[in-house]
Amino acid sequence: MEDMRKQYTRSGLAESDCHSNPIEQFRNWFDEMVQHNPVDWFEPNAMTLATADQDGNLAARIVLLKGFDESGFVFYTNYESAKGKELAANPKASLAFYWPFMERQVRIDGSVQKVSREQSDKYFHLRPRGSQLGAVVSPQSQVLASRAELETKVAELEQQLAGQTVSLPDHWGGYVVYPTQIEFWQGRENRLHDRIQYIRSGDGWKLQRLAP
């Protein structure tokens, strides 16, 4: 592992290249990643979500970004899952995007709150029916006796709701991460990476460069 390394030579990031609004800067980078995604299996909206419980115990996992605007970055999950319980106890989170093909990372820190039930319901019914059924029956993060147990519950619910709309369950919905800090990282040669950080300041943002 000591010899595993890569030189980052694709591009740089100057302050003059950055939009004054980090949400728009993120949009530019995200659109560029989607446009230049070289492989079908890579999901540009995949992000690491880090949370902590009330005792400061940390946990991180990959989830999918499902929307963003000036109000924040949105993802959906089971409210009774491990991350749901952690966010209930400590409503703060850190997000990290890694786009290796563009040699870029984005880090987002902020406070978290649930989105409206209307927004959750709208998104829930955009999901494939199989995903809706899974969200209803899965006791996310709890111990299962076997995979067969879960598959049986899905099949039973599918039969029960044949020809009917699957209703949004009370235990499932969205969160929005309201950013207080966003950092854009561009890989550079010899580990002299470019790091541009935005800190929320009143109704605007302060931009500054960080050492690599």
Image (spheres, grey):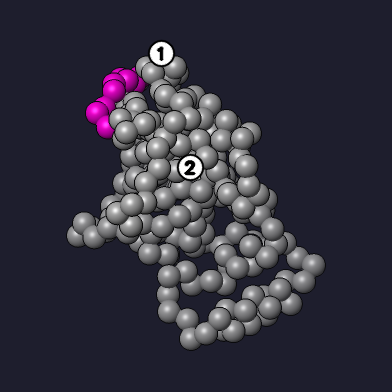
Crowd rating for badge 1 (residues with CA inside 10 Å; few <14, some 14–19, many 20+): few
Image height check: is 54 above or below 154?
A: above
Magenta stretch, main secondary structure, is strand
Which label is found at residue 113? none
3D distance between C-alphas at marks 1 and 2: 23 Å
What residue sits 60% from the left and 59% below the top? 168
| Quarter holding residue 196 | top left
Residue 27: x and y in percent read 52, 29
Residue 210 magenta-highlighted: yes
Residues drawn in magenta: 204-212
Q: Looking at the picture, which amino acid does disc 2 mark?
A: Pro
Which label is found at residue 100? 2
What residue sits 37% from the left and 17% below the top? 15
Residue 110: x and y in percent read 33, 39
Between 140 and 115, which is closer to the camera in this rendering?
Answer: 140
Q: Provide the secondary structure element on which disc 1 rests.
A: helix
| Residue that extends furthest to the right in the rendered view of this protein | 163
Using residue 149 as the reference point, say whether residue 95 is left or right of it: left
Which label is found at residue 16? 1
Residue 46: x and y in percent read 51, 48
Residue 76: x and y in percent read 51, 52
Using residue 130 as the reference point, say whether residue 108 is left or right of it: left
